[in-house]
Image (cartoon, rainbow, N blue to C red):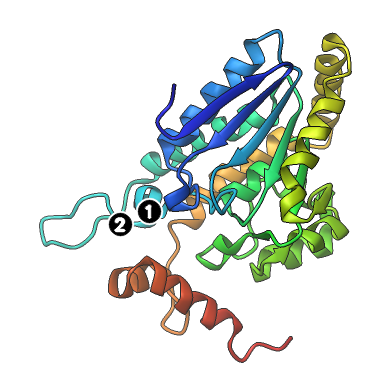
Amino acid sequence: MYEHVIYEKSGNIARLIMNRPEKHNALCVKMFEELVDGLKTAEADDDIKAIILKGNGKSFSTGHDLSEVGFVYGFGDGKSADGRQRRPSQRVRLQFDRKLLEMYQAFMYSMKPIIAQVQGHCIGGGLYLTEIVDLAIAADDAQLSHAEQRLMGGGRSLVMNTEILLLGPKRAREFLLFGEAMSGKRAAEIGLVNKSVPADELESATEAWAALIARHPKDALVMGKVAQQQALDSLGFTSQIMRGYVGHTLSTNMRFEEDEYNFFKGRRDEGTTDAARSRDRFFTEGAVQ
């Protein structure tokens, strides 16, 4: 049915399975579009009462695929006449970020409950999905982080309201500013996910919750979801995600000083993997714990 997503249905439960295991389910635009299409299919299917969002392979998702979306940071958008890499315009950035906003909103405002089943790495955009859906169960040894904040985020998130509500203002600020990974077990202790289980129990635990949700009447589930969305909107959630995408456009147009780590120069000189390691060393070596 899709190139990068597997859609499964059994009884009252639908499963959206990210299927780029060789890329640790990094979110390319096409995969995200397919996820949204699959979500709409599940919403339109009157048999479906609950949706499980999961990733095939070792990881849930490592976030947006930099080899594709990197143009918003100034690479991969063609070259100017003198051969230098050209930065995209603000209008191009805003159009792209608005598209991402709309795809996240599809999950935030789904008409049916969604459970995220989290294993391995869950980073950046992958973690956003986990944060905005109804419920999340993680493997004890999963690694959840907003490591993308070490690129140029500096503590600015697309869904800060959600993170503040889940973690509290101080802990959310710490989690975003430092970009450090936490285990699934720790994420459950502080409320980032609902609970964690041993990795070999993750699927059965998620399926059990989906089956329990499916015992509710269909109308009750939909009306309950709408009531929660209205409550979240009263806390400013819609306006926050609007601010989040504009903030992303602005923050991807910043400059780096000489003593600051520029991941994008590092990527050019070392490649993506080595640049990510250099970035993390810059943030951790010599730091006071």
Residue occupied by mark 2: 75
Furthest residue to the bottom? 286
Residues at marks 1 and 2 touching, judged by CB atoms closer than 8 Å: yes
Q: Residue 156 falls in which quadrant of the image?
A: bottom right
Tell which of 178 and 57 is nearer to you. Answer: 57
The answer to whether 272 is drawn above or below residue 136 in the figure is: below
Report x, y in % for residue 202: 74, 47
Residue occupied by mark 1: 70
Counting residues from the N terminus, which is met first, the one under dot 1 or under dot 2?
A: 1
Taking the image as shown, residue 101 lies to the left or right of residue 75, namely right
Report x, y in % for residue 158: 62, 47
- What quarter of the picture does the C terminus occupy? bottom right
Taking the image as shown, residue 15 lies to the left or right of residue 37, namely right
Please tell me whether mark 2 sits on a helix, a strand or a loop: loop
Q: Amino acid at mark 1?
A: Gly
The residue at the point 48 percent across, 28 percent down is 34
Taking the image as shown, residue 220 lies to the left or right of residue 199, namely right
Report x, y in % for residue 159: 68, 46
Taking the image as shown, residue 183 lies to the left or right of residue 15, namely right
Tell which of 156 and 44 is nearer to you. Answer: 44
Tell which of 36 and 1 is nearer to you. Answer: 1
> Is residue 259 visible from the viewing direction of this image?
yes
Q: Amino acid at mark 2?
A: Phe
The answer to whether 14 is drawn above or below residue 184 in the figure is: above
Report x, y in % for residue 74: 33, 57
The answer to whether 140 is drawn above or below residue 29 in the figure is: below
- What quarter of the picture does the N terminus occupy? top left
The residue at the point 13 percent across, 61 percent down is 83
**Gap between marks 1 and 2, in whole Å?**
6 Å
> Is residue 168 visible from the viewing direction of this image?
no
Please tell me whether mark 1 sits on a helix, a strand or a loop: helix
The residue at the point 60 percent across, 82 percent down is 284
